[in-house]
Amino acid sequence: MKPGFFIYVSLAVDLLIAVSKFIAAAFTGSASMLSEGVHSVIDAVSQLLLLWGIKTSKKKPDEKRPFGYGKELYFWSFMVSLILFVVGGCISFYEGINRIKNPGFDGNPVWNYAVLAIAFIFTLISMASALKTFNRQRAEVPFWEALVKTKDPSTIIVLLGDIGDMLGLAIAFCGVFFGRLFHNPYFDGIASIIIGIILLGISGFLLRECKSLLMGESINRKTLRSITKSAENDEAVIRVKKNYSMYLAPDELLLHLDIVFKAALNTKDITDANERIIAGIQKQFPRIKQIFIEAVAP
């Protein structure tokens, strides 16, 4: 399957759903349905930005960016979280307040129910695609732990976006249904406000995760202990004094080791030891693409 295929699926779904929601909102005047339409447009734009981030992150290193362009994905993921979800949440919140200030019923609610049913089906398809990718990445790691510790923000943005969509659809349905059932238009406005709060909540979580990756998140301690042990098993090494690491992309890491070598070694011995250590680490952890070793004093 093509990398990022689930994003193309989500993009197509979001565009189709957005059009149907706006049509329903135009015929019924539903604030929650309009909020859902805005939500779908935001999701579609976020997919485009993520696809751009994935594309640019694959560019090869050059003189301008000797460590590569991997962090382009983290930057665009951060922008999606910061701008689009926050803007979408604020718009939904505003539409809800506006509906409460100007209550009323317009049009036939059947439009809303039909669109919500269609959106539910298409969103399930998109979420299933994103969930399949996420489950493949997390393997045996528990769902929430993998969600917090993932190094691929594009996956969780799409997945959480779809989960937010499902919640939004359920809330929009309740807003329309109970509003008509109790002849109370305030339900629609309240539903729109709740959808806005959900979007803002998703944004807050994603911002925290994307910021950590963008600022230079380190390899986990367990892996670093294994790397240190692997290096110290070499016959030329006394100990690893310090280590520094950073994610450059979901599948690319940078590692720097300060190593104390045995005093009797000459330059060739240390060079040979460096090559052995690097080969051993990369065999065990192939995602560590760039390894730098510096010989230091005890």
Image (tube, helix red, strand yellow):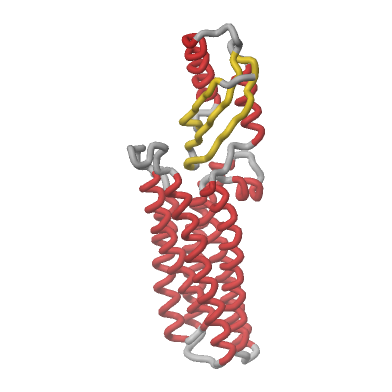
| Residue under the image location 58 percent in, 52 percent down | 209
Outermost residue, front side: 297
x and y, in percent, of residue 114 in the image: 48, 76
Q: Quadrant of the C terminus?
A: top right
Vertical position of residue 161 compared to residue 25: above or below: above
Image-based side of 229 in relation to 79, left or right? right
| Residue under the image location 53 percent in, 76 percent down | 92
Q: Quadrant of residue 48?
A: bottom left
x and y, in percent, of residue 29 in the image: 48, 86
Vertical position of residue 127 compared to residue 232: above or below: below
Image-based side of 201 in relation to 157, left or right? right
Outermost residue, left side: 63
Q: Quadrant of the N terminus?
A: top left
In this view, the residue in front, 297 or 53, is 297
x and y, in percent, of residue 96 in the image: 56, 82
Outermost residue, top side: 264
| Residue under the image location 48 percent in, 50 percent down | 74
Number of numbered tags placed on the structure image: 0
In this view, the residue in front, 275 or 14, is 275
Vertical position of residue 127 compared to residue 110: above or below: above
